[in-house]
Image: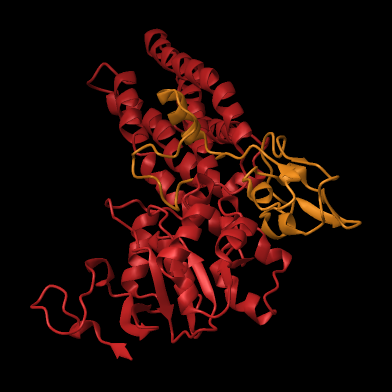
Amino acid sequence: MNLDLKSASGSGPRQAGFAVLPELRKPWVARFTVKGGRTIPVVRSRLSPADRLGSLRMRWDIGRMDYRVLPGLYAVGDPGRGSDVFVSANYKMSFDALRSSLDGLDAWILVLDTKGINVWCAAGKGSFGTEELVSRIAITKLALMVDHRRLVLPQLGASGVAGFEVARRSGFHVEWGPVRAADIEAWLAAGRKKDDAMREVRFGLRDRLAVAPVELVHGWPILPAALALAAVHALPAGSGWLSRALPMFLALAGTWPVGALAFPVLLPWLPTRSFAAKGAVLGLLWSLGAGILGGLPVLGLAAAVLVAMPATAFLAMNFTGSSTFTCQPGALLEVEKGFWPMVVSLATGIASGAASRLFGI
Amino acid sequence: MPLTYLKNGETLSLDASRCTGCGSCIDVCPHAVFVLEGGKASVAGRGRCMECGACARNCPAGALSVVAGVGCAAAIIVGKLRGTAPTCECGCGAEKETRCC
């Protein structure tokens, strides 16, 4: 039996039927179905332009959106007692990736309460974890909805969920699916076997560019800082101020796109394994080039380089959080070893900028 | 060429005497760190290990251990400023797929 969302009494006068929670009055809920005496939301398995726009806004960190999905049991297609159960996080982008990979299938989706965090991060924090999974299985009475005892989990959930513990405590056997939901179809076609590619996390150009926008957005303070430094550096005001300020401003402000966009693009080819050092190299090349082309005097050029290097190094270092291969001891090493060199470089740079103006060299 | 970082996999340890060769670690590792040799797991790519902790959590024999943590400089800086362990909870609304762990 299918129920139309329009006939559901949500805010209007209550009639015989059912009330829809506001969290489920969403365009991605196609309808409701009654299974095992319960009303289950059936979700669309194709993403709408609104879903894609929402993802784009999250990538660019535009607006403080609550991007959560109500935890619980959902249906894709017309699942039965033998259909697979796929587990996801209640971050909408994770949920969207899963449902859009199940197009044409009849399956269940069990959404855990990960506080709106994606699978991998939530697994690291433990909210996509054994405890939550076992309790969600109990809350949704999953054992009454299906005859089998299998769950398909995204592989990246493994840092939070102990499969053998889940089996012991709930009776459900955990199958680790592919890293990327997009590989589910191929995984099923291969007889539920993962090949090496399905098991490995990638960080190719496309992946790096997908996570770059938010770093770009967060790097905005560089712009006013560059503006202020260049404006003060070019004092006194009056004739020649703009021609002194502009090349300095460009050399400094350029560290923003260089550190937040060029860095992720060039990451595999930059020297050393330290993100901060890679970033500093990029900052050096950029500011040297921009400063020379802009005709900065010797000490002014030194100032631009010494300020630009820690700026790009810092942006690059922050990209460790977006990467898929950095470990904590390494990041700690970068922060601890990098802090003072960055501060000293910045201070020396500002001092040489002042000296450049004072002595006119 | 796989990307590698500083101090990769230094805290990962495998006690071969406890390993039963079930292959769970191989199944959950996102960086192909393990291989099965002679019925037991062995560490073949320590330099690729990001210490996510998936293998140790899913080793039923308790043969694996690793100090898992987020490899995120921002989390470490926030932790240092607050005098706590590294945390992604900076309250800046950055706890999303786009910038995290």
Dividing the picture into quadrants, the one containing residue A235 is top left
The relative height of residue A353 versus residue A169 in the rendered view (above or below) is above
Query: Which color was chain B given?
Result: orange
The residue that appears at 58% across and 66% down in the rendered structure is A171
Q: Outermost residue toward the right?
A: B38
- Considering every residue shown, the one lying at the far bottom of the view is A1
Q: Position of residue B86 (x, y in %)?
A: 49, 32
Residue drawn at x 34%, y 25% is A230
- Quarter of the picture containing the C terminus of chain A is top left
Position of residue B66 in the picture relative to residue A102 (left or right):
right
Asked whether residue A2 appears in the rendered view, the answer is: yes
Q: Where residue A306 sits: x, y (%)?
A: 50, 22
Q: Nearer the viewer, residue A84 or A139?
A: A139
Vertical relation: A45 (above or below) A261: below
The answer to whether residue B32 is above or below residue A335 is below
- Identify which residue, A236 or B49, lies in the foreground: B49
Image coordinates for residue B59, horizontal then vertical, percent: 71, 51
Query: Residue A181, image x and y in percent?
Result: 54, 69
> Within the image, what quadrant is residue A189 found in?
bottom right
Question: In which quadrant will I find the N terminus of chain A?
Answer: bottom left
Residue drawn at (56%, 36%) of the image:
A282
**Residue occupying the point 50% across, 49% down:** A121
As drawn, the chain in red is: A
Q: Nearer the viewer, residue A171 or A56?
A: A171
The quarter of the picture where residue A198 lies is bottom right
Please give left or right for residue A357 compared with residue A101 in the image.
Answer: left
Q: Is residue A201 visible?
A: no
